[in-house]
Amino acid sequence: MNQVDNTSRVASAGIVMVLAICFCIQGWAEVSFDTDGMLLVDGDRFFPVGIYELPEGDALDEIAGAGFNIVRASASIESLDRAESAGLKAWIPLGGNMDVRDGAAREKLVGMIERCKGHPALLVWEGPDEPLWNVWYSTQGWMYGGQVEAFRDRIKAAREGNAAPDADRLFEEYRRALNVADYASAETAAAKLWNALGEPPPRPDMLMSTAPQRAKALADGLHAGYAAIRETDSAHPVWLNHAPRNTVPDLAYFNRAAEIVGCDIYPVPYQTTGHSDLANKRLSCVGDYTERMQAAGPGKAVWMVLQGFGWRDLREEKPEDETEGRRPRYDETRFMAFDAVVHGADAILYWGTHYIDKPSRFWTDLKRVVTELKGLGDVLAARTLEIDLHVELKPTLYSADRGIVAVAKRARGRTFVITVNECHEPLGCTISGLPVADGSSLRDAQTGSMLTVEDGTVDCFLGGYGVAVLEEQQ
C-alpha cells in the first residue's frame, strides 16, 4: 500500500462531529476533534508532541524549548500550573481510578475530575496504561513464571522426602500444555499437582482460562468510568494507551471507553527486543501498529507512544555488550516518528526519557527530531490530501518486501509530500499524482536538494529507513 487509506476514518466522521460538539465549555480551552480525528484546541488543529515527564525548573524549559507541547501531569493544580508556566498543555493519567464498579469508586473518580477539569492547561484524561494487556500479562507471569518456580521448589523437597510420586509427571504435563497454549489442560494439571503436594493453589484466580472474563469486567468498569467522566466533564476527551499486543476485536471492546486510542511500540534494536509480536519486527512495525490502532478504534484519534530510551536503561545491571538494548540512533528516531505520521497518527509521544541521562547523545538526537516536528507542526496537523498518490519502486537488487510510503498535505498555501522508506535497504521510486504544477520544484527540507515535477511525477531516492519531507517551492 503506497498511500494510507483513511476511508474508515472518514466514514466515521459523524461520530467525531458529535464529540466535537461536546467538548466545548466557555471559559476553558476548547478541546474537540476535526472530522479526520485531529485534535482542535480553541478551534485550531493541534498535533501533540508529548513527553512522559514534568520536571522542575530549567529541565522543563528545555522540554518546551525543544518543541514538546504536551506533558504528563498529575491530578493536581500545582502540576498543571507548572505545565502552563512553561507554555505547555498536559494530560492527566487516571490509572485504576477509571475502573468504576461501585459507588465509592465513582465518587473517587468524580472527585479527581472535579478538582482539575477547569484548568486551562488540561487537554486530555488518560485511562490506565495498557489495561487489556496487563490482565493477560499478570496471569502469564504467574502461570509461566511464578507458579513454575513454586512447583520446582516444592517438587525438589517432595522428591527428597519420597513424597508426591506423581509430581514430576504432573509438572511435565503442566509445562507441555502451557507450551501449546492449552490453558485448560495446564490448569487441570496444576490443580492435581497442588493437590499431590498437599497444598491449596496459592493464586486460584490467576488462570489464563478466566483472563477473557476478567478483561471484560475491566473493560466494562472503564466504560462505566468513562460515562462518569463524560457526565462530570464534557470538555476533555479520554485516551487509552495499549500495549503492542492483543487482538483487534478485544482492543475495540476496551476502546468504547475513549475518544483517543493508541499503543506504545519500542522496537530498537529491531528484531531483538521482542516488543513487536507481529511478523514484522523491524522499525516499520511502528506504521503497522498505527494501522492496527485505527482498526481497533474506527473514527477515533490515534496517538502513538514511541521509544524515548534504550532497553538497557531499564536494567539495574547493564549488559557488558553496549549494543545490547542500545538506545535508538537519530535516523531511527526520525524514521519511527514519520512512519507513524504517514500511517495516520494524530500525535506522537515519547516514553522512557526519565530513564536516560541528560545531557546525552540520545537526548540531543531526540530533541533534534522533536524540534523538526515542532517546525512542521502546521503541516503534521494538516489533513492528508485525498488524492490518487501512487508510488512505484524503481528496479532494485533487494527483495523490497517493504517499500516507500508517501502522503501529501497542504499547509502554508503549498503542498508537502512526506515520504518514508520502510525497507532497511536504499530504494528509489517515482511518485505520481502530485497536485503540483509541472516544472515546479519540491525541496527536501533536510538536505536542501531540489526535485523537479514533470507531469505530476517526481523521482525520489531514500536510504534505508530514510525520510524526506518535500516542500513545494513557489
Image (cartoon, rainbow, N blue to C red):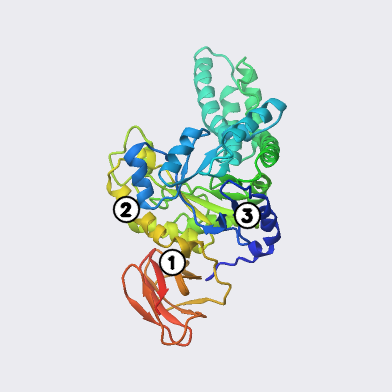
Near mark 1 (Cα within 10 A), the count class, few <14, some 14-19 or many ≥20, is: many
Q: Amino acid at mark 1?
A: Val
Sequence-wise first label, 1 or 3: 3
Marking on residue 135? none
Between 353 and 205, the residue placed more toward the observer is 353
The x, y position of residue 274, in whole percent, is 46, 46
Q: Amino acid at mark 3?
A: Lys
Circles 2, 3 touching at the beta carbon (< 8 Å):
no
Instruction: State whether residue 184 appears in this view.
Output: no
The x, y position of residue 264, in whole percent, is 50, 47
Vertical order, 327 against 54 (above or below)? below
Between 357 and 68, the residue placed more toward the observer is 68
Between 106 and 117, the residue placed more toward the observer is 117
Q: Secondary structure at mark 2?
A: helix
Task: Name the residue carrying label 1.
Answer: 420
- Which quarter shows the N terminus? bottom right
For the residues marked 2 and 3, what is the alpha-carbon distance in whole angstroms?
31 Å
The x, y position of residue 135, in whole percent, is 60, 36
Near mark 2 (Cα within 10 A), the count class, few <14, some 14-19 or many ≥20, is: some
